Image (cartoon, rainbow, N blue to C red):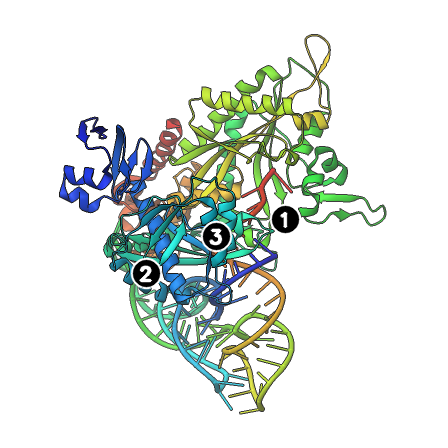
RNA sequence: GCCGACGUAGCUCAGGGGUAGAGCGUUUCCUUGGUAAGGAAGAGGUCACGGGUUCAAUUCCCGUCGUCGGCUCCA
């Protein structure tokens, strides 16, 4: 007998070799019907795998992340199986479960498929699922595994197997389909009741641009048709929050092919919004001892040779601008740090002067490949809320911590709760990519890890994601469709100070090298606004809204009074406008609701004679009658309250 | 840049080898109204751009540009 510990810490005895399914059955028939996989001492396994020793287990159903993963992984096999049936000779790459569904990378050889073929594949998958095909796990010696796929002519699987160790290789069989796979899988295909193929795309083999591009088919599956329908409805809802759609509807920004792709045009309302954000951060930075600087939009090639950016990105940049007579080369600035380094060199600093913090909303231009552009989140010209802190080595941790505080302050002010933090370090296997000494990198990485730890911030550590000059701490927020975008970033840099030979005079009267911290709490104004729009679906917090109130006269007779109210509001610093059209009140209200203006002020005969406004709040409805002064106070208090909470 | 899809009025979209349609918006007029759409008339399109096939192309084919979903990249 072995002892099995359940998640509630209760312990039950089972015969040695008991399976997950048997454990589920011993608990309840219902659980046995719904269970999809099991974790044994933290490792997710098939329900049919015998358990040989004492263990802690957790049974996974559709309601668990692991249950969904098992379902989707098996669905990927099912799809591959259907595709092999429909398109004989197809070769297979990898087919994992992902956050929302699964995909399989395939090489169709002669065949091509498009989304028009999805119906056919889905139908075949459902047929196979109903056959209740069992997933059978087999341990296979490496030689045999290689021979199997060499015979089949599937070079991708051969490639994968070559990297595996003998004795660890397993195949899974379902129906006629055999796949190299670690598992785990469902006991059989029957829980897969609803299937939707979602997209088709190219994907490089092993993520390597220089290798062959396979066809990637994305899909998702559910245990009930109704859940599929709900998922599709949710996707439709998410599309309504798309910042590109809301940006057009609320007249925030636009693009013009004539101006150039990836070059956003900020419209008056969008510019107002962005300025409000900038002013908010400027205020925070003033309090935190940052000094504003302004630098030009271009820089001499030599600047970037010094910084190392030229060597790294020179060929992947917009081509240089040249002076007609001398042939000097200038680059559109792709980042602000080299300029800020030169500002540091303008005068001599004592150790007592440090840290100095130069801040600039610096507009930069980067050549992004055309296929990478995406709304406001990935553009070719954007403005960083950039600053560079030059400090003594003993100040790094404290300064870094202070920047974390600013980022968190901003996220709080905007009610971003669902963010994640990521520490990006060097790739130890590819040190060529980086500049600077081993010792400096060690120091920088250590500083970031310690400061993050001391802030009690939970951050995932990812190697190979560092910038070429230093490691960083990034803050990621998801968009409406769950795609992760990097917003705030903080980077510790020992390298640029060296390359620019930055110095300060220490208490020992000797020259010392400062440490540089790059930071942008928003990341870029463009991307931040994009994510903000998707977060609030265009219902901006009152203090940010481009228009905070709109005055709706009941008829043309009250235009004069409306103007009086407008003047009063403007004098209190409230952004407001009048809907002067000869429309009925109902229509004006409808339009103002659609434009998501936080407050509507209805003025007619009654209001004019009483000196009041009738207030309606966006999404809430009628709040009743207020004097204009009382309304201004109400609005300003609301703003103050929001701001004081952060 | 690569794979795939798409591009019809300012917006959302219908149509389809014989040079175009709806709703919203916009303009003018009527209406002057009390908390989510008042009425009428009008304007507005080289059907993304450039080639080709055809008696005839917005429609079919090719290329370019742009957009969308991925991949790669992201200083």
Give residue A229's position: percent from left, percent from top: 27, 56
Give residue A584's position: percent from left, percent from top: 31, 59
The subunit carrying tag 2 is: A
In this rendering, does residue A618 appear at all? Answer: no
Residue beneath disc 3: A147
Q: For the residue carrying disc 2, how many other residues have a C-alpha within 10 Å: few (<14), some (14-19), or many (20+)?
A: many
Q: CA distance from mark 1 to mark 3?
A: 46 Å
Q: Which mark is residue A125?
A: 2
Q: For the residue carrying disc 3, how many other residues have a C-alpha within 10 Å: few (<14), some (14-19), or many (20+)?
A: few
Residue located at (51% from left, 56% from top): A214
Q: Residue furthest right?
A: A325
Q: CA distance from mark 2 to mark 3?
A: 28 Å
Q: Give the side of residue B59 with respect to residue A259, left or right.
A: left
Quadrant position of the C terminus of chain A in the picture: top left
Residue beneath disc 1: A367
Q: Is residue A405 above or below residue A28?
A: above
Question: Which of the 4 quarters of the picture holds residue A31?
Answer: top left
SS state under label 2: helix
Judge depth for marks 2 and 1 and give the one in front: 2
């Amino acid at each position: 007998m072995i002892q099995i510990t359940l998640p509630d810490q209760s312990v039950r005895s089972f015969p040695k070799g008991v399976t997950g399914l048997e454990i589920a059955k011993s608990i309840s028939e219902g659980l046995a019907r719904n269970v999809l996989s099991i974790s044994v001492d933290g490792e997710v396994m098939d329900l049919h795998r015998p358990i040989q020793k004492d263990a802690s287990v957790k049974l996974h159903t559709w309601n668990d992340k692991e249950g969904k993963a098992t379902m989707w992984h098996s669905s990927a096999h099912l799809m591959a199986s259907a595709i092999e049936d429909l398109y004989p000779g197809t070769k297979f790459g990898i087919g994992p479960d992902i956050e929302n569904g699964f995909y399989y990378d395939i090489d169709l050889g002669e065949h091509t498929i498009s989304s028009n073929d999805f119906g056919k594949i889905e139908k075949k998958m459902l047929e196979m699922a109903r056959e209740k095909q069992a997933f059978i796990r087999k341990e296979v010696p490496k030689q045999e595994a290689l021979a199997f796929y060499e015979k089949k002519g599937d070079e991708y699987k051969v490639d994968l197997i070559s990297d595996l160790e003998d004795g660890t290789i397993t195949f899974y069989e379902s129906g006629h389909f055999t796949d190299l796979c670690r598992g785990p899988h469902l006991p059989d295909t029957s829980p897969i009741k609803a299937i939707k193929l979602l997209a088709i795309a190219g994907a490089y083999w092993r993520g390597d641009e220089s290798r062959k591009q396979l066809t990637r088919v994305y899909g998702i599956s559910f245990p009930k048709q109704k859940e599929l329908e709900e998922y599709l409805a949710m996707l439709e809802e998410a599309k309504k929050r798309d910042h590109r759609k809301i940006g057009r509807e609320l007249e925030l920004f636009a693009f013009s092919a004539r101006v150039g792709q990836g070059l956003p045009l900020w419209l008056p309302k969008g510019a107002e919004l962005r300025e409000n954000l900038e002013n908010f951060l400027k205020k925070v930075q003033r309090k935190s001892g940052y000094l504003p600087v302004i630098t030009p939009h271009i820089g001499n090639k030599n600047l970037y040779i010094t910084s190392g950016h030229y060597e790294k990105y020179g060929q992947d940049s917009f081509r240089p601008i040249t002076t007609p007579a001398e042939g000097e080369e200038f680059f559109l600035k792709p980042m602000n740090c080299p300029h800020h380094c030169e500002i540091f060199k303008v005068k001599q600093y004592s150790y007592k002067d440090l840290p100095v913090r130069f801040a600039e909303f610096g507009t930069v231009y980067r050549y992004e490949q055309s296929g990478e552009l995406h709304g406001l989140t990935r553009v070719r010209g954007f403005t960083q809320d950039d600053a560079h802190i030059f400090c003594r080595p003993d100040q790094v941790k404290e300064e870094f911590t202070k920047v974390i505080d600013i980022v968190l302050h901003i996220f709080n002010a905007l009610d971003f709760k669902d963010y994640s933090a990521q520490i990006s370090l060097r790739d130890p296997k590819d040190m060529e990519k980086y500049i600077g000494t081993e010792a400096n990198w060690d120091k920088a990485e250590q500083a970031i890890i310690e400061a993050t730890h001391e802030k009690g911030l939970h951050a995932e550590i990812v190697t190979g994601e560092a910038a070429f000059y230093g490691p960083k701490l990034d803050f990621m927020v998801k968009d409406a469709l769950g795609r992760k975008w990097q917003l705030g970033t903080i980077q510790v840099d020992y390298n640029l100070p060296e390359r620019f030979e930055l110095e300060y005079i220490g208490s020992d009267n000797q020259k010392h090298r400062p440490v540089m911290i790059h930071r942008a709490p928003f990341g870029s104004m463009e991307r931040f606004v994009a994510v903000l729009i998707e977060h609030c679906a265009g219902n901006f917090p009152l203090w940010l809204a481009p228009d905070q109130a709109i005055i709706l006269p009941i008829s043309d007779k009250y235009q004069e009074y409306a103007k009086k109210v407008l003047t009063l509001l403007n004098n209190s610093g409230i952004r407001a406008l009048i809907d002067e059209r000869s429309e009925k009140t109902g229509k004006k209200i409808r339009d103002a609701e659609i434009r998501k203006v936080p407050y509507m002020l209805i003025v007619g005969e009654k209001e004019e004679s009483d000196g009041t406004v009738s207030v309606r709040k966006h999404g809430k409805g009628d709040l009743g009658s207020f004097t204009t002064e009382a309304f201004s106070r109400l609005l300003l208090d609301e703003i103050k309250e929001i701001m004081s909470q952060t």
